[in-house]
Amino acid sequence: MTKRLNAKELAALTEIDTPTICNTLDILAPDYQSKGFIVEPFFCLRPEMKPIVGYAKTATCRAIEPSSQTPRQAVDKRHGYWAYLDKAPKPAISVVQDLDGAQAGFGAFWGEVNSTIHQAFGCLGTVTNGSIRDLDAFADGFQAIAGLVGPSHAHVHLVDYAVDVNVLGMVVRDGDLVHADCHGAVVIPDNVARDVVKTADLQARREAVILDACRKPGFTLDRLKKAYKDAAKVT
C-alpha cells in the first residue's frame, strides 16, 4: 500500500487548483483523462475558499422514504459511522452519494448539525450529489460541493458507509485522496500523488512561455507557433 502523504505534502496540494490537478493527471495517469473527476453540475458553498485535500470517508443516504431500520438499528448505524469517521487517515473529506436517483437531494443530509459533527471528526468538507441547507449556519470553514440546495431534510437517513460511491460522476473509494475547490473535485491516485506538485510546476513554466508570447505587443501567428515549440523544450 502506498504511504499516505504527510502534512507538508498535503499542504502543497492545497496551493494548486483542481483544474491544474486534472492537467497533471493527464500526464501522470493518462487513464484519468476521462474519469476520476466531477462531470455533472454542482453548487459550491464557498467558492472563495482555497482547495481542500483529504482522504475520502464515503457513505450513502436516502431521503424520499422513511428508513426501514428499527430505531435501535438506526442508532447502531449512526454510532458505527461516527467510529468510522474517527479513524485515520486524516484530514478527511466526506463523500456522500444520495441514492434517490433522479430525486437525489429530495432531503438534505448536510446542514448546520452534520457539517459541525463532521468537522469535529477532522473532515474539511463534503462532496455530494445530494442537497445541502442551512447555508449561513454551516460549520465555519467547512466546504461543500453539492448537487443542489434544498430546505428540508425530509426522511434523510444513512444507508451505508465505507463503500464505493459515485458522486456527480466521480467514483470514489474509501480512503481515496480527494482534491476539491470551486471547480469541482478529482481523485488523485496514490501512486502519482507525490509527483503532482512537481508536474504542476513544469506545466506552469511551459504555459508561461505561451502566455508571454500572447501578451507581449506585436503578437503574430509565427510567434505562437514558436512559443509552443519552445514550451515543449522546458524541463
Image (tube, helix red, strand yellow):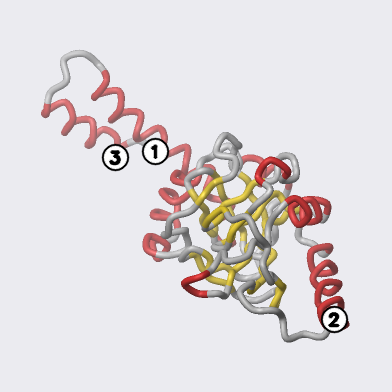
**Quadrant of residue 40 within the rendered picture:** bottom left
How packed is label 3: few (under 14 Cα within 10 Å), some, or many (20 or more)?
A: few
Name the residue that disc number 2 marks: 71
Q: Name which residue type carries label 1.
A: Thr
Q: Is residue 13 visible?
A: no
Q: Position of residue 179 (x, y in %)?
A: 57, 51
Name the residue that disc number 3 marks: 232
How packed is label 1: few (under 14 Cα within 10 Å), some, or many (20 or more)?
A: few
Q: Name which residue type carries label 2.
A: Pro
Name the residue that disc number 1 marks: 235
User: How far apart, in angstroms, are the residues tagged by discs 3 and 2?
Assistant: 62 Å
Q: Earlier in the sequence, mark 3 or mark 2?
A: 2
Relative placement, left or right, of 69 versus 97 is: right
Q: Quadrant of the N terminus?
A: bottom right
Q: Is residue 17 above or below residue 176?
A: above
* Element carrying mark 1: loop
Which disc, if any, is residue 121? Answer: none
* Element carrying mark 2: helix
**Quadrant of residue 74 within the rendered picture:** bottom right
User: How far apart, in angstroms, are the residues tagged by discs 3 and 1?
Assistant: 8 Å
Q: Quadrant of the C terminus?
A: top left
Q: Nearer the viewer, mark 3 or mark 2?
A: 2
Q: Position of residue 197 (x, y in %)?
A: 54, 43
Relative placement, left or right, of 211 versus 155 is: left
Q: Position of residue 19 (x, y in %)?
A: 44, 46
* Element carrying mark 3: helix
Residue 156 vs residue 169, the one in the foreground: 156
Determine contact: label 2, label 1, CB under 8 Å. no
How many marks the image carries: the answer is 3
Q: Is residue 53 above or below residue 177?
A: above
